[in-house]
Image (tube, rainbow, N blue to C red):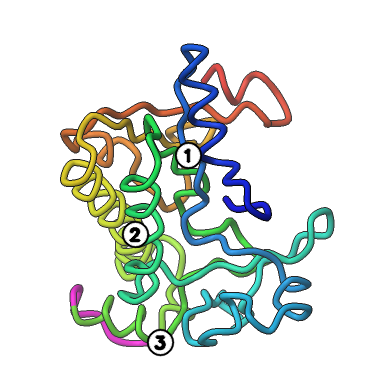
């Protein structure tokens, strides 16, 4: 939030409150930038530890985006990645008089071409240990029990992180809100259980994402 000697977030919060406006910190969780940032900045978080980067089914550690640049995500199952993100949220809650945290992109990325995400070896090992399945999730057939459990496991990874955020907010600033940007359709929301996440006892709100090709998706 520092721009030279000026703390922009402090100023934003202070002036907002002076005018009766709540200020919620918009955070993007495990999204940490683009491949161009990674290549041009040796100190970028994505260069800290390659094993932290989320992998897709084909082993790529980025999500292809022609419009904005290829997106890079940290692995939400990795304990060190989770602790890093939570430490940032703790800093925001302890050092700024924000009214809440807004969790944007609280999910695994959408398909990267024909490949979805979450295929880091530590993630696969944890899935097998918890569900008792064998084999490679890359070979699971859609509609099979194994594939359904693989989808369910990744939802649980995200939901458990939301719970950790909730626990942090309750401990540090219990009056603060937690909000989340959700898929336009709860029925079609990929690999994230927003209805379960909403059961946690915090001040919560789900925010509809309105950038969709048609109003029919939103109204449904």
Q: Which mark is residue 121?
A: 3
Pointer 1 residue: 25
Q: Which mark is residue 174?
A: none
In this view, the mark in front (1 or 3): 1
Residue at 51%, 39% (x, y): give it.
Answer: 10
Q: Residue furthest front?
A: 5
In this view, the mark in front (3 or 2): 2
The dominant secondary structure in magenta is loop
Q: Residues within 10 Å of mark 2 (few under 14, many from 20)?
A: some
Where residue 121 appears, x then y in whole percent?
A: 40, 87
Residue 134 belongs to magenta span = yes
Q: Residues within 10 Å of mark 3 (few under 14, many from 20)?
A: few
Cα separation between marks 3 and 2: 23 Å
For residue 218, side relative to residue 65 (left or right): left
Report the span colored magenta. Answer: 130-135
Please identify the quarter of the rendering in which residue 91 is found.
bottom left
| Dots 1, 3 in contact, CB < 8 A | no
203 to 75, vertically: above or below: above
Where residue 119 appears, x then y in whole percent?
A: 47, 78
Residue at 37%, 47% (x, y): give it.
Answer: 95
Pointer 2 residue: 86
């Amino acid at each position: 939030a520092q721009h030279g000697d000026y703390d922009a977030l402090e100023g934003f919060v202070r002036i907002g409150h002076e005018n009766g406006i709540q200020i919620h910190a918009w955070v993007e969780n495990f999204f940490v930038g683009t491949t161009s940032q990674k290549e041009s900045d040796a100190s970028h978080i994505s260069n800290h530890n390659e094993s932290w980067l989320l992998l897709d089914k084909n082993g790529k550690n980025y999500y292809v985006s022609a419009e904005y640049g290829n997106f890079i995500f940290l692995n939400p199952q990795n304990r060190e990645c989770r602790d890093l993100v939570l430490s940032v949220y703790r800093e925001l809650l302890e050092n700024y008089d924000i009214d809440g945290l807004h969790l944007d992109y609280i999910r695994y990325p959408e398909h990267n071409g024909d490949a979805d995400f979450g295929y880091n070896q530590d993630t696969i090992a944890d899935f097998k240990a918890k569900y008792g399945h064998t084999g490679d999730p890359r070979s699971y057939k859609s509609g099979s029990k194994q594939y359904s459990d693989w989808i369910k496991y990744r939802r649980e990874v995200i939901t458990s992180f939301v719970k950790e955020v909730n626990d942090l907010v309750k401990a540090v600033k219990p009056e603060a809100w937690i909000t989340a940007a959700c898929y336009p359709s709860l029925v079609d929301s990929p690999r994230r259980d927003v209805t379960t996440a909403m059961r946690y006892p915090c001040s919560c709100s789900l925010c509809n994402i309105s950038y969709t090709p048609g109003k029919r998706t939103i109204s449904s």
